[in-house]
Amino acid sequence: MKVTLKVWRQKSASDKGKIETYQLAEVSEHMSFLEMMDVLNEQLITEGKIPVAFDHDCREGICGSCSMHINGEPHGPDRGVTTCQLHMRMFKDGDTIYIEPFRAKGFPVIKDLVVDRSAFDRIQHAGGFISVPTSGNTQDANSIPIPKADADKAFDAATCIGCGACVAACKNASAMLFVSAKVSQFSLLPQGKIEAKRRVLQMVEQMDKEGFGNCSNTGACEAECPKGISLENIARMNREYLKASASSSE
Ligand code: SF4
Ligand code: FES
């Protein structure tokens, strides 16, 4: 199939950037979106032009680096998938596809479609360590009973891959879905309760410092999250934050 690509090109962080138009004549519907981008870059290199910079690593939906805004949606029109798992069969012959970087103050553009998401690393670092010892003999898994429902919720929260689609989807560029997943994956488990208060206070403080906005309550983050992270995590983080704030001011 033939597609017209309208791609955001930006030489550097200080460049203004603009949309450039490219035509691809032979795209297979079985290609992944990133394979289609590889074809575009081969074409650009053959023409002596600079290829489009974009992030990718695992190409199987686990690293969270392939963050693109495709036709106005983070990770494109399919549900529950990352850009690397999106296939060209989601588009039709003759389609025009707009491809832009994730837009948020906390995610400055480095080049073309690559944004700096190190703010997420700093938020996670702010959460600090877990003091439960992990060295020595491995503890029997059954020695700390954890209700199945809590274990499942903690595991679901831990599937967040830090892609940033929640931020890109939110009109306030809020990072609350991401941060609440990282808070919840520990706070739901006994091992994570020891530092729970310090963790939530420090992570929320860092989130604010990085320039992310408040929750817009529209649920756009949950709708666009490739891992189905639930808004329930934001409610849990808010409760944890209130509890921690109240006890730290006692
Ligand atoms: S909550 Fe979902 S959209 Fe946000 S960073 Fe995690 S996986 Fe990506
Ligand atoms: S390249 Fe790793 S999630 Fe897409």
Image: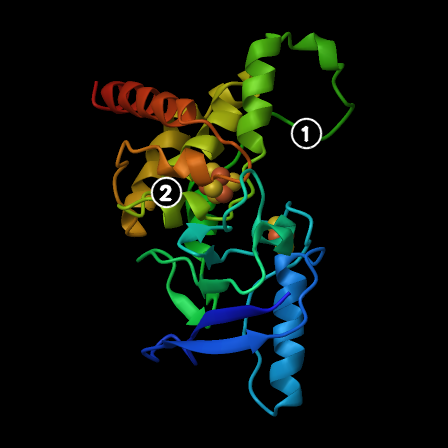
For the residue carrying disc 2, how many other residues have a C-alpha within 10 Å: few (<14), some (14-19), or many (20+)?
many
Q: Secondary structure at mark 2?
A: loop
Which amino acid, mark 1? Thr
In the picture as drawn, the residue positioned furthest to the right comes out as: 137
Where residue 119 appears, x then y in whole percent? Answer: 41, 53
Residue 127 visible in rendering:
no
- For the residues bearing labels 2 and 1, Cβ distance under 8 angstroms: no
Quarter occupied by residue 230: top left
Residue 76 visible in rendering:
yes
Which amino acid, mark 2? Ala
Q: Quadrant of the N terminus?
A: bottom right
Nearest to viewer (mark 2 / mark 1): 2
Distance from Cα at disc 2 to Cα at disc 1 = 30 Å
Give the left or right position of residue 99, taking residue 159 as reference: left
Give the left or right position of residue 193, taking residue 19 as reference: right
Give the left or right position of residue 151, taking residue 207 as reference: right
Quarter occupied by residue 28: bottom right
Residue 134, numbered label: 1
In the image, residue 90 sits, relative to residue 203, either above or below, namely: below
In the picture as drawn, the residue positioned furthest to the bottom comes out as: 48
Closer to the N terminus: mark 2 or mark 1?
A: 1
In the image, residue 74 sits, relative to residue 231, either above or below, namely: below
Q: Secondary structure at mark 1?
A: loop
Residue at 34% from the left image edge and 78% from the top image edge: 14
Residue at 38% from the left image edge and 74% from the top image edge: 13
The answer as to whether callout 2 falls within 8 Å of ligand 1 is yes
Where residue 33 appears, x then y in whole percent? Answer: 61, 59
Q: Nearer the viewer, residue 90 or 85?
A: 90
In the image, residue 43 sits, relative to residue 215, either above or below, namely: below
Residue at 58% from the left image edge and 34% from the top image edge: 159
Residue of label 2: 175
Q: Nearer the viewer, residue 218 or 62?
A: 218
